[in-house]
Image (cartoon, grey):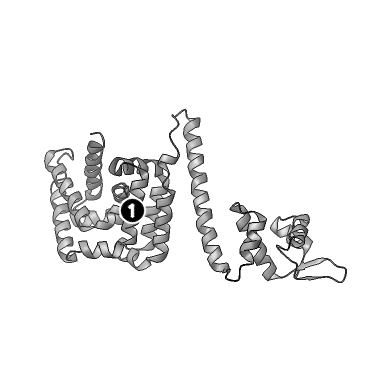
């Protein structure tokens, strides 16, 4: 058991606040000392922790009391939901900080809501929680999917611009991506082709791309192969529609030591750097048009 002063010391909640929580029936002490001082056990501390999470999310004390008193209240489900809401709050705070940084540099203010991808990011997080097997099957690991989400968060405004360019608005883009997530297995089955044939075709395309790395990546021949690779990848990997920033992530991956080693061994020294350079030229040219 912990005294009220001990609870106040390690939680940061004042003794007066704890007394008030007792008075309104929000958090009753677990017992009293012979002198009448309040005592709190571990269960009471867990309830206090729950209250503090709800307060952080902006809930009023009356609302918190009503939630905790519900017969079907599930503490673990509440923690999960609180985590989701706090992540949304964190993402919004991060975006506000980024916006302030741009304003400090004298950059023109943009419509903040227009570039808000929090709804889409939350859908990705939910998909990660509910579809682990699909993620491992098609992304290789949950860590790779986390990298995918992290990249979207880091470059949110750029991803939003691409989304608006492709779909007309962030809202329409989010709706389309949510549909893909909800019907992921169905979409993958519908577009599934023989994996071995896909691998052979992909290897053939990359072999052609790197057959003579002295060629300028801007040449029509090299750019035509890049275009063919992109179209083939999009056709055989419908999961790529889950993010407008996929290709940027892919190009960055070519600088990773493991990826460089695999590609350089398969296609020749310097292949990884050459492939990334060819892709970057392709997307820079198409972005400017």
Q: Secondary structure at mark 1?
A: helix
Q: Residue at x 53, y 66 (%)?
A: 77
Q: Residue furthest right?
A: 35
The image shows a total of numbered marks equal to: 1
Q: Position of residue 79 (x, y in %)?
A: 55, 63
Question: Image quadrant of residue 220?
Answer: top left
Q: Residue at x 14, y 38 (%)?
A: 219
Q: Residue at x 48, y 43 (%)?
A: 95
Q: Which residue in the protein does label 1 denote?
A: 177
Q: Position of residue 101 (x, y in %)?
A: 49, 35
Q: Residue at x 78, y 55 (%)?
A: 16
Instruction: Report whether 167 appears left or right of 269.
Output: right
For residue 161, above or below residue 191: above
Choose between 266 and 162: the one closer to the eye. Answer: 162
Q: Position of residue 274 (x, y in %)?
A: 22, 45
| Quadrant that contains the C terminus | top left
Q: Residue furthest top?
A: 106
Instruction: Report whether 93 appears left or right of 118.
Output: right
Choose between 264 and 28: the one closer to the eye. Answer: 28
Instruction: Report whether 211 appears left or right of 150.
Output: left
Q: Position of residue 54 (x, y in %)?
A: 61, 57
For residue 178, above or below residue 225: below
Mark 1 is surrounded, within 10 Å at the Cα level, by few (under 14), some (14 to 19) or many (20 or more) other residues, namely many
| Quadrant that contains the N terminus | bottom right
């Amino acid at each position: 058991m912990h005294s009220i002063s001990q609870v106040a010391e390690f939680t940061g909640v004042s003794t007066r606040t704890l007394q008030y929580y007792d008075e309104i029936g929000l958090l009753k002490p677990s017992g009293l000392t012979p002198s009448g001082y309040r005592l709190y056990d571990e269960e009471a501390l867990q309830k206090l922790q729950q209250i503090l999470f709800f307060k952080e999310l902006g809930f009023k004390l009356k609302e918190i009391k009503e939630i905790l008193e519900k017969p079907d209240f599930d503490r673990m489900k509440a923690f999960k939901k609180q985590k989701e809401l706090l992540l949304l709050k964190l993402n919004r705070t991060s975006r506000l900080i980024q916006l302030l940084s741009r304003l400090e540099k004298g950059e023109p203010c943009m419509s903040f809501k227009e570039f808000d991808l929090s709804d889409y990011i939350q859908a990705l997080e939910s998909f990660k929680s509910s579809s682990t097997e699909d993620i491992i099957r098609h992304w290789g690991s949950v860590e790779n999917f986390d990298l995918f989400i992290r990249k979207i968060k880091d470059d949110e405004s750029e991803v939003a611009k691409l989304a608006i360019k492709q779909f007309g608005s962030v809202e329409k883009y989010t709706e389309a991506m949510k549909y893909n997530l909800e019907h992921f297995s169905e979409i993958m089955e519908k577009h599934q082709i023989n994996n071995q044939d896909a691998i052979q075709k992909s290897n053939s395309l990359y072999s052609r791309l790197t057959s003579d790395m002295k060629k300028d990546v801007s040449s029509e021949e090299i750019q035509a192969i890049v275009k063919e690779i992109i179209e083939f990848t999009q056709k055989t990997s419908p999961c790529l529609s889950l993010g407008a920033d996929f290709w940027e992530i892919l190009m960055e991956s070519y600088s990773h030591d493991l990826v460089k080693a695999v590609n350089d061994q398969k296609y020749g020294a310097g292949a990884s750097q050459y492939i990334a350079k060819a892709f970057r030229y392709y997307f820079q040219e198409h972005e400017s048009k």
